[in-house]
Amino acid sequence: MKLVHIITGLGDGGAELTLFKICKYDTINRHIVISLKGPGKYFSLLKKLGIKVYCLNMSFFSIHKFFFLLKLIRSLEPDVIQTWLVHADFLGGIAARLSGTKNIIWNVRYSNIETGKAKLTTILIIKLLSKLSYVIPQLIIIVSKKAKKIYELKGYDKQKLKFIPNGYDLSILKINKIQKINFRKSVNLKKRIPIIGNVARYDLQKDHLNLLQALSIIRSKNIDFICVLVGSNINQNNINLLSDIKKLKLSNNVKLLGRKNNISEVMNGLDVHVLSSSYGEGFPNVLAESMACGTPCITTDVGDSALIVGKTGWVVPPRNKIKLAEAIEKALLEVGSANWNKRCTKARLKIKEKFNIDKMVKSYNEAWIRVYKISS
């Protein structure tokens, strides 16, 4: 089949990563990608795979670009069109129907739809999409079980919602002792101090402050640790973050590493990974990536975090520094023990059994075939 994917943009995000994985690991179908915005991180990566990519540099009200999209879809003659993210579901879905294509699948990744946390335009589009869900898509793929319930309540056609979790390449994400040693060297750790890690861009929803407050409680108990923060805008130029670290007297315990490309080395280098988000998560990749490398996780109960981590780690309420500190303390006291080694093994095994890349690609293929057969 010829699959045409329409996505809002190709920047550094979870939806973009999943689209890239599908194009990389699905060898059965032909894939073409249309980005409504310009090229981003995944533009060149998709081109390296030999995927044809069109970038429209389109604003939401670009009427002439919308008509260009219509012509482009007609010229490509897709068997199935799959749209990704809210704006692409809306504009791409309408364009696909107007172009004469009925085999349309939406891909819902967005879970932060609370007033005050989401943009007003996004909330309005989601309300429109809830109505259009009954007439435009044949199927709606959703990445999170919790999000599935949210969108049902928002009025989406529940008969069309299909849960497909993210999948991970365990030949890349694996336990690697050399990477562990290299990472510890890169952060100048000579003695055996437990390393806590948080991989997340600097954003209100990631709640770095709650994590820092929990770490301050740990430090007050004279427990030795280093916490590395990894992600976009996590650096010495971030005045607000530096101020919080200084106020909480964590300057000797927290290192800011910025964005890292080798996620496998980072996750191998950590003893425990902490996701401290307060809201807005769907299916957090960092948890599965960490666990695939044999690194247990502590997470707040947001999105499908509890589903991913399960009994292999710790799940605590969001915005609760006391509970988060308690979980971190328990983990640090267990690091290096026989029980800890079992926990590490179970963490990787869970990703291998539940969330491997082959399982995800197979599920997408089944969805495409199902939609294609409806019109055949």
Image (tube, helix red, strand yellow):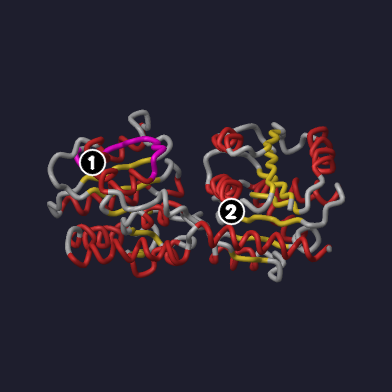
The C terminus is located in which quarter? bottom right
Q: Is residue 173 magenta?
A: no
Q: Residue most toward the top?
A: 237
Residue at image point 68% right, 54% down: 126
SS label for mark 2: loop
Q: Residue at x 41, y 45 (%)?
A: 200
The one of 329 and 368 positioned closer to us in this rendering: 368
Q: Is residue 276 above or below residue 53?
A: below
Q: x, y (%) of residue 100? A: 87, 51
Which region is colored magenta?
A: 252-263
Q: Which residue is mark 2?
A: 110
Q: CA distance from mark 2 to mark 1?
A: 35 Å
Identify residue for label 1: 184
Q: Nearer the viewer, residue 169 or 160?
A: 169
Residue name at image x 25 percent, y 52 percent: 271
Write down the quadrant of residue 40 in the picture. Answer: top right
Residue 79 horizontal side relative to residue 112, left or right: right
Q: How many numbered marks does the figure carry? A: 2
What kind of residue is marked 2?
Answer: Tyr
The residue nearer to you, when weighing 184 against 123, is 184
Q: Nearer the viewer, residue 187 or 364?
A: 364
Q: Position of residue 367 (x, y in %)?
A: 67, 62
- Where residue 198 is drawn, which disc sits there? none
